[in-house]
Image (cartoon, grey):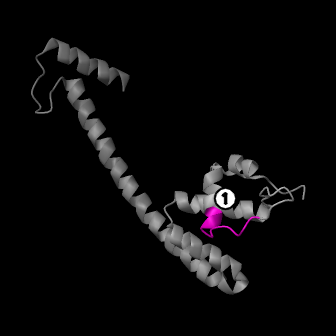
Amino acid sequence: MPDDLSIADVSARTGLTRDTLRWYESEGLIPAVPRNAAGVRRYDEATVRMIDLLVRLRRTGMSVAHMRDFVTMVGQGARSHGRRMRLLEDHREEMEARIRELIDDLGAVDDKIAHYRRLIDAGLDCGEQPITDPDELAQQRLLGETD
């Protein structure tokens, strides 16, 4: 079929290695990929779209087990829409919690950067004492100007 893609095409499109694509297939994350007469895998667009979604789900921290559950439910058709939606809603809640944590962590890093910037600008060491070593002071000022 002319619209089917080779494993190299799918690898380039999804960013997954060929080995990872083969692993996805062996783990049941994607259905068995049909092969042409020469035995070469040929991926259809529906499978590539599923791989794209799985890449996003994995990147956002979904476990392989939950990904497998999702794919199994997809194979069950419309009767699993509600369960699929619930799995995705639960995952979304977990993502939002991680985003909130990351925002808090980013604030802590920003606070620490501001702390060091203030020390450098004031010529102070970590004990808030003046830096008296001219070489250390020059180094601190140099670092402060390049950050």
| Residue 53 vertical position relative to residue 86 in the rendered view, above or below | above
Residue 123: where, in percent of width, then height? 18, 23
Closer to us: 33 or 64: 33
Mark 1, residues whose alpha carbon is within 10 Å: few (<14), some, or many (≥20)?
A: some
Closer to us: 53 or 17: 17
- Would residue 108 be found to the left or right of residue 3 on screen? left
| Residue 9 vertical position relative to residue 129 in the rendered view, above or below | below
Closer to us: 21 or 141: 21
Residue 85: where, in percent of width, then height? 60, 77
Q: Quadrant of residue 77?
A: bottom right
Q: Which quadrant does the N terminus fall into?
A: bottom right
| Residue 94 vertical position relative to residue 106 in the rendered view, above or below | below
Q: Magenta region: which residues?
A: 24-33
Q: Residue at x 72, y 61 (%)?
A: 49
Residue at which label 1 appears: 52
Q: Which quadrant does the C terminus fall into?
A: top left
Closer to us: 95 or 42: 42
> From this viewpoint, which residue is outermost toward the front?
38
From the image, give the main secondary structure of the stretch colored magenta. Answer: loop
Q: Is residue 26 magenta?
A: yes
The residue type indicated by label 1 comes to Asp
Q: Residue at x 27, y 40 (%)?
A: 112
* Element marked by disc 1: helix
> From this viewpoint, which residue is outermost toward the top?
134
Q: Residue at x 61, y 78 (%)?
A: 84
- Would residue 71 be found to the left or right of residue 108 on screen? right
Residue 55: where, in percent of width, then height? 60, 58
> From this viewpoint, which residue is outermost toward the right?
2
Q: Is residue 28 magenta?
A: yes
Q: Quadrant of residue 5?
A: bottom right
- Would residue 126 be found to the left or right of residue 30 on screen? left
